[in-house]
Amino acid sequence: MKDKNPISSSEVGTLWLTYQEKTMILRILEYFIEKSDDQQAKNIMGGLWQELSYYVTKIKKIFQEQGIAIPVGFNQEDINLEAPKLYDNGFDIMFVRILKEISMGMYTLNMNMAYQDDVMGIYEGLTSTTQKIYKSSTLYLLEKGTLSLPPKVTMPKSSEFIESKSYLNGFNPFNDKRALNDIELGYLHHGIETNNIGMQLITGFAQCAEDKEVKQYFVKGKELAKKQIKVFGDILLESDVQFSATSGSTVTTSKVAPFSQKLMMFCIYLLNGFGIVGSSFGTIFSLRKDLSMKTALIAKDIYFFADEGVKIMIKNGWLEEPPQMEDRPNLIKE
């Protein structure tokens, strides 16, 4: 029976996308928990699985009450628990941490498009879960020595204002570029850290993908991650900042896919969106023109890579269609 007060189109859309994301993450967690030999890591992932499963059930209940078709999402057909380890050395928690970074931004956006109490309650609860797991994952990785801290700098002793437009320079090779500010340093560090994990992830996907086109797509993604690491690393070196990112993981030699190609492609689709947003952040808040241009070009590369991935997913019937409004022109024609 439909609710007398139906949820809005934006709430249908955000809940639908949240269902896709969470069912994907549940499958990934199930595999990582099965293969983990570290009890502390299992506890972090197990706690996250329980909480996400609870909210997936709540979303499903809202859909049923509102007469909305429940999405297919990702189920047991998308996971192979018998597959050998594809990643080692703490990759599971490093990847969980990245997923929680993405989730924090998504829930803020989703909350801004929610109007009903029960829908807002879902995003409120998911936000609390995400912040808790992000913190425990970060502390775990620091304790294990698999997470590199951002570069240390001299602490400012006074407040200053920018006095010249030369602060924005960076293109002219004959002019000295100013030192990186702390905002730019933080963005560059984060870019190297996330692309390093992304490169490990997609290397494993490329290793076990069955379809030739999908395998080539993953290889292209690996090269794109390497390119971004090099661009960010070169900028740091130009400013006499040495950065050594801990790999945080080892891709094993297994060629047995733990996940369906549909799930792996959707996972990269999700990370591409995060990459575009991250590059946009770097473009806006970098006050050196050369940095803004380089991050804008990276965003362009990610966009075209993501577009290629969407086409592959559509071609193979792997991209579920989001709910949409009525096609009025066609209804009138009929």
Image (cartoon, rainbow, N blue to C red):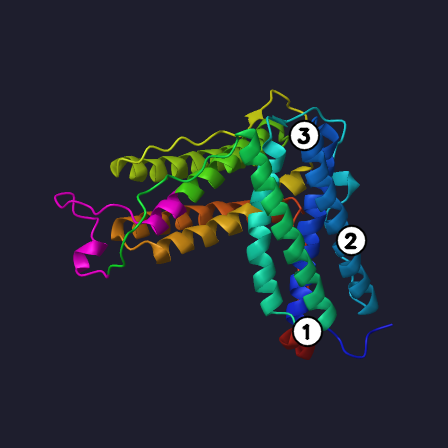
Q: Nearer the viewer, residue 100 or 5?
A: 100
Magenta stretch bounds:
161-188
Tell me if residue 192 is in the magenta stretch.
no
Q: Residue at x 70, y 40 (%)?
A: 45
Judged from this view, the residue extending furthest toward the right is 1
User: What type is the residue that disc 3 sits on?
Assistant: Ala
Seen from the viewer's position, the closer of residues 272 and 178 is: 178
Magenta span includes 168: yes
Instruction: Give the residue type at disc 2.
Output: Tyr
Q: Please identify the quadrant where the C terminus is shown.
A: bottom right
Q: Which residue is mark 1?
A: 8
Q: Quadrant of the N terminus?
A: bottom right
Report how far apart the C-alphas of labels 2 and 3 lie in the structure.
27 Å
Q: Give me the C-alpha separation between circle 1 and circle 3.
A: 39 Å
Q: Mark 2 near mark 1, Cβ–Cβ under 8 Å?
A: no
Q: Which residue is mark 3?
A: 257
Per the image, the residue denoted by label 2 is: 54
Q: Image point 20% across, 48% down: which residue? A: 171
Q: Which numbered disc, 1 or 3, marks the residue closer to the eye?
A: 1
| Element carrying mark 1 | loop
